[in-house]
Amino acid sequence: MIRIGIIGCGYWGINYVRVFSELPDVTVACVCDTSEDRLRIMHRKFPYVFPTKLLEELLADEQVDAVVVATEASTHYSITKACLLHNKHVLVEKPLTTSIEEGEELVKLAEEKKIKLMVGHTFLYNPAIRKIKEYLSDDDVGSIYYLEATRTHLGLIRKDVNAIWDLAPHDISIFSFLLEAQPFWVSAVSGGFLNNGRPDVGFITLGYPHNILGHIHVSWINSNKVREISVVGSKKRIVFDDLNSMERVRIFEKGAAITGEADSFGEFQLQLRDGDIISPRIDTSEPLKNQCNHFISCLSNGRHPLTDGTNGLNVVRVMEAVNASLKQRGAPVEISRAFVEVSRVPVEISN
Ligand SMILES: NC(=O)c1ccc[n+]([C@@H]2O[C@H](COP(=O)([O-])OP(=O)(O)OC[C@H]3O[C@@H](n4cnc5c(N)ncnc54)[C@H](O)[C@@H]3O)[C@@H](O)[C@H]2O)c1
């Protein structure tokens, strides 16, 4: 039996308590939140789980094997560090940290202590994203031209990080997973229309190997709720619409490619493909449950998490480059080739 403690029981943390409570061979032993209101709500829903306001109390409990850190992003570093120092395995929400230095320290600490550190990049456990990965692995879409993500809605406006740090880590982790590559450069601009000192809108462009482009639009102030990712290739376009529960993934068998040699006037023949629109069957399992299952499986079998600390750190590296570009109003910022080359994205998934 693995005993889990959940730190941070807000909007997202409560889902962890529900999901882990449903898994076999796992007990949610303790929940911790600095807010008494949140602890009251937790106690009403899960009366058998011990509630505490004090992180030290949870950490001192030697029966707790592993913890989930589901607090605000700016607190991830200090809370995760404290947990690792108390020899607890950690599943921390995204982003791992808000700086590379902090992320590197946590990865090193987990390695030294031989403790599992996993990051909640939930979309990598989403059956729809896995289905798209299958299509890309089978070379079904032809040459990939670009990926595009839109993540817009009104709110939820965070008090500690901006809209880009809140939302873009999802898409950066998805792009790297699908392409099995890190970007070489980024260019990003933002707008802070609510005047609270933090950008609420962002447009990020990313350059990947083989001239593949990525583009991410995030917004807290757009009344049109969109959660969409497109992969545009020479043979097909794949669209993931997270809000369309009937057809989460659609494959458009249409594309444009150059065929053969240029003619005597130097003009290439363009091949336009037209075909069906396919809506594949997608497994209905809950992404968060898949992620939690994977964490438990890694603890039980000594396996390496798909979204381990290094994977989470890679996302933070891209986010720091995004920050640097924002400061220069969109000037492209190179991401160290050394980092890009060593950080090939692992694709093995086990539940
Ligand atoms: N993976 C996903 O799909 C996904 C979805 C939503 C949120 N998240 C992430 O989850 C995290 C939490 O988001 P949320 O929407 O639940 O935020 P939230 O503000 O609703 O909840 C955070 C909770 O943490 C508590 N907290 C803060 N500091 C604490 C401390 N030192 N000790 C104990 N408790 C503390 C707060 O009181 C609050 O109840 C964020 O990092 C966010 O990015 C991930």
Image (spheres, rainbow, N blue to C red):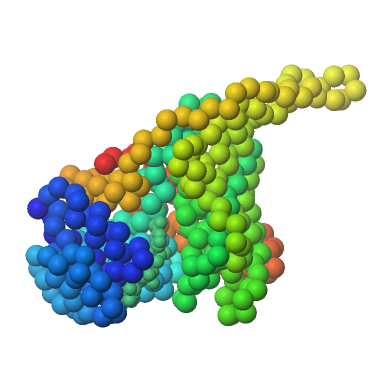
Which image quadrant for residue 16?
bottom left
Q: Residue at x 60, y 61 (%)?
A: 223
Query: Exactly how many numbered labels are in the figure?
Result: 0
Which image quadrant for residue 348?
top left
- Please say whether residue 310 is visible from this viewpoint: no
In the rendered structure, the answer to whether residue 15 lies left or right of residue 144 reads left
Residue 259 image position (x, y, % from top left): 73, 21
> The C terminus lies in which quarter of the figure?
top left
* Between 274 and 172, the one nearer to me in the picture: 274
Residue 251 image position (x, y, % from top left): 55, 31
In the rendered image of this protein, does residue 103 appear above or below residue 239?
Answer: below
Which image quadrant for residue 56?
bottom left
* Between 160 and 214, the one nearer to me in the picture: 160
Residue 185 image position (x, y, % from top left): 61, 54
Q: Residue at x 21, y 46 (%)?
A: 297
In the rendered image of this protein, does residue 64 appear above or below residue 337?
Answer: below
- Please say whether residue 233 is visible from this viewpoint: yes
In the rendered image of this protein, does residue 55 appear above or below residue 179?
Answer: below
Q: Residue at x 49, y 37 (%)?
A: 247
